[in-house]
Image: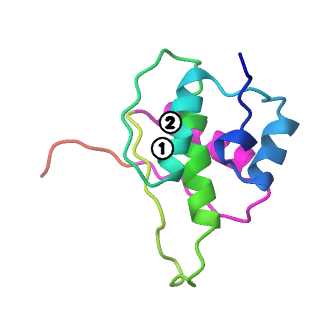
Amino acid sequence: MTTTTFSGLGVAERLCRALAAEHYTTPTPIQAKAIPLLLAGRDVLGIAQTGTGKTAAFALPLLQRLAERAAPLAPRSVQALILAPTRELALQIDASLTTYGRHLGLRRLVRRHHVGKHR
């Protein structure tokens, strides 16, 4: 049985460096299945228990694809939108994006939006 690495999944060196600094050495099963598909531009629906690495499974390909864009972008343009059901989860996702993307020079914003009755 061979051990899969993040590099072996196609994750860029700058992201692998950030993962190594966090002592992430071996992809979880959901990461090993999802990352290559997402890097190839495929849509993926993944279901796994809490703590299995779902955030990294979607965040690493997202960050890599954003960092690899060759065309200049318009100022103040949005490149990706991640919706989360709670503020706490949004902050956790942002912390992960910060950690994984530390060598990419990308910016993030967490915005709180209340959904309620219209007046």
Whether 9 is drawn above or below 27: the answer is below
Residue 62 on image: x %, y %: 54, 53
Q: Which residue is drawn at 57% across and 22% down?
A: 29
Which element type, helix, strand or loop, lies under badge 2?
helix
Residue 68 on image: x %, y %: 63, 68
Q: Quadrant of the N terminus?
A: top right
State the CA–CA distance, disc 2 to disc 1: 5 Å
User: How many numbered marks are there?
Assistant: 2
**Which label number is shown at residue 34?**
2
**Is the residue marked by circle 1 packed among few (<14), some (14-19), or many (20+) residues within 10 Å?**
some
Q: Residue at x 37, y 49 (%)?
A: 113
Furthest toward the left, the residue is: 119
- Tell whether label 1 touches label 2 (CB within 8 Å): yes
Furthest toward the front, the residue is: 1
Q: Which residue is drawn at 52% across and 31% down?
A: 33
**What's the magenta region?**
86-112
**Which residue in the structure is indicated by mark 1?**
37
**Is the residue marked by circle 2 packed among few (<14), some (14-19), or many (20+) residues within 10 Å?**
many
Display colour scheme: rainbow
Furthest toward the right, the residue is: 21
Residue 67 on image: x %, y %: 64, 65
Based on the picture, tell me whether residue 103 belongs to the magenta stretch.
yes
Amino acid identity at mark 2: Ala
Q: Residue at x 46, y 69 (%)?
A: 78
Amino acid identity at mark 1: Leu
